[in-house]
Amino acid sequence: MAVTNKEKYAVISKFEQLCKKHGLARQPLNRYAEQWAADGLIQSYGQAVVEDVMAYYFSINNNPQWKTFAYKFADLYKAKTARAEDDIYRAKLRAKMKELLDES
């Protein structure tokens, strides 16, 4: 699957937009050099997943950096997936507990 330049630069732009949205200082990114990291992430996971994990990264990190995001993406993806599974599991447990409390 070939990744277009538009997709690569869209991911980098999304990162910059999230920085601005969270009130962080603009990071000097060499867009040409960093497009290769974006290319690898998009080829491996898809653009939607990359942007979803990026939003998660911004929610857990006070000072997000592009290089850290790109380097630790696999770990972030695993953590986000595990958290989503845990949320589902906890919701099931709460529903079961509510049933038990309603019966008594």
Image (cartoon, rainbow, N blue to C red):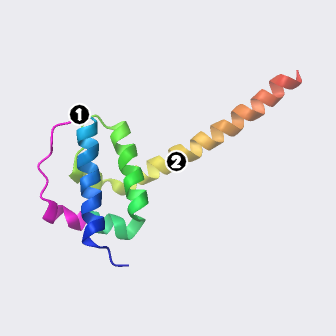
Q: Position of residue 3 (x, y in %)?
A: 32, 73
Locate residue 23: give its quadrant. Answer: top left
Q: Nearer the viewer, mark 1 or mark 2?
A: 1
Earlier-in-chain disc, 1 versus 2: 1
Q: Is residue 18 above or below residue 46?
A: above
Name the outermost residue toward the right: 103
Snapshot quadrant of residue 88: top right
SS state under label 2: helix
* Residue 5: x %, y % from top left: 24, 70
68, 43: nearer the viewer = 43
Which quarter of the image is occupied by the C terminus?
top right
SS state under label 1: loop
Q: Are marks 1 and 2 in contact (CB under 8 Å)?
A: no
In this rendered view, identify the residue nearer to me: 76 or 42. Answer: 42
Q: Residue furthest top?
A: 104
Q: Which residue is at 28% across, 38% downward?
A: 21
Magenta stretch bounds: 24-37
Q: What is the x, y in percent for residue 74?
A: 38, 57
Q: Which residue is mark 2?
A: 82
Magenta-span inclusion, residue 36: yes
Question: Which amino acid does the dot numbered 2 rest on?
Answer: Ala
83 left or right, relative to 36: right
Residue 75 at what x, y percent from top left?
Answer: 39, 52
The structure residue drawn at horizontal position 66% and vertical position 37%, both measured from the top left corner, is: 91
Calculate the distance from the C-alpha at mark 1 to the C-alpha at mark 2: 28 Å
Image quarter where the N terminus lies is bottom left
> What residue is drawn where x is 41% and y is 65%?
46
Mark on residue 23?
Answer: 1
How many other residues sit within 10 Å of disc 1, few (<14), some (14-19) or many (≥20)? few
**Location of residue 70 by image quarter:** bottom left
